[in-house]
Image (cartoon, rainbow, N blue to C red):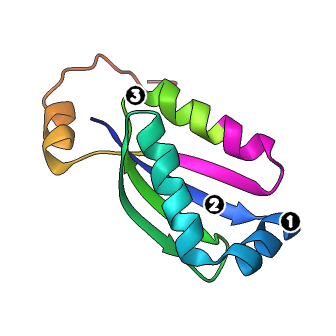
Amino acid sequence: MPKFLLEASYAADGARGILKEGGTSRRDFVQQLVESVGGRLEAFYFAFGEKDAYVVADLPDASTAAALSLSVSASGAVSTKTVVLLTPEELDQAANKTVDYRAPGT
């Protein structure tokens, strides 16, 4: 199953929700959300800095990841960025594929 990194930034309403419900409650909710679409939560971390939370999840496919991102972002309480993660073996497979590329102007 493909692995994704979801980066979350809370708006004011989202931050108020975390203060009210707590961090473990949010992690448990995200786990249930990921499992409801056929995925598996690998990690959930809160952070300081530009992003407020990082989630690593195995999801069935990119359209499922997009559906999660759209639903979460539509709430207005959280904005997300989704990154596809590759294993070293997947990168080896990519490196062994032949691509007929020409740089512009060459």
Name the residue tied to disc 2: 8
Residue 85 in the image: state x and y as whole percent. 35, 47
Q: Which mark is residue 25?
A: none
As for residue 101 lying within the magenta part, the answer is: no
Direction top: furthest residue: 100
Residue lying at 27% horizontally and 20% vertically, measured from the top left: 99
Q: Is residue 66 left or right of residue 95?
A: right
Using the image, determine if residue 29 lies above or below residue 39: below
Q: Amino acid at mark 3?
A: Asp
Q: Which residue is drawn at the image coordinates 74% and 56% (left, top)?
A: 78
Q: Residue at x 21, y 42 (%)?
A: 91
Q: Which residues are magenta?
A: 70-82
Residue 14 in percent (x, y) is at 78, 65
Question: What amino acid type is highlighted by mark number 1?
Answer: Asp
**Which residue is labeled 1 in the image?**
13
Residue 53 in percent (x, y) is at 58, 68
